[in-house]
Image (cartoon, rainbow, N blue to C red):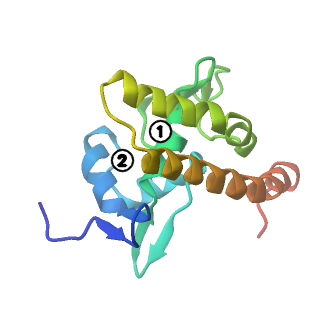
Amino acid sequence: MSKEQYVISFGKGVRLMSEAYYIQEMGAFGINTNRAFRSLCRAICCPLLFIGRVGFVDPAVFQICIKNLSIPGSKDFLFPNCYLKTYVGRPHLRQKVDPKDIESNWKYVVRAIIDSRKMHGFHVPGADKIAIKTAAAELTRFTLRMIPSAEQETTHGTPS
């Protein structure tokens, strides 16, 4: 393991994980560069916070964004560098999350995260529940700000 710091803590319940941590975890699956990880974060509506040259994400928000991908009835999601990219056009595949989906699903997603922890025998302290719910609320506020820009992009194309 490198001497790189993966976690920055700003007090109880407020911590950020570096992109290097996620790249180390997902590198074998094609998320092996900063560019791929940042692309994934943009695709799933997970905001990145840049400190110096390093990107960080809130692990609770990242977890909510990933959990949102696996809601029953959702389309399959293609991560960056996925070999199925050649199949893009098929109706059951998607490469980007609509911010409206996160807005409408966040309570279900938070409940699913808490329930899955209980099902796996993990105790979910009140502070963790509050942190997850707070992260979901922040993510919802973020996506509400993103919806107008996403709709403008769809309607008018990417601004130059």
In depth, the one of 158 and 63 nearer the eye is 63
Q: Tell me if residue 145 comes above or below residue 72 in the rendering.
A: below
Q: Position of residue 149 (x, y in %)?
A: 79, 58
Q: Name the residue rendered at 30%, 61% in the picture.
A: 20
Residue type, mark 1 in image: Phe
Q: Residues within 10 Å of mark 2 (few under 14, many from 20)?
A: many
According to the image, label 1 marks what residue?
Answer: 79
Q: Which mark is residue 31?
A: 2
Q: Tell me if residue 115 comes above or below residue 39 in the rendering.
A: above
- The reply to whether discs 2 and 1 touch (Cβ–Cβ < 8 Å) is yes
Left or right of 84: which side holds 141?
right
Left or right of 33: which side holds 144?
right
Q: Position of residue 127 (x, y in %)?
A: 44, 51
Q: Position of residue 123 (x, y in %)?
A: 34, 35
Q: Position of residue 27 (x, y in %)?
A: 28, 46
In depth, the one of 137 and 4 nearer the eye is 137
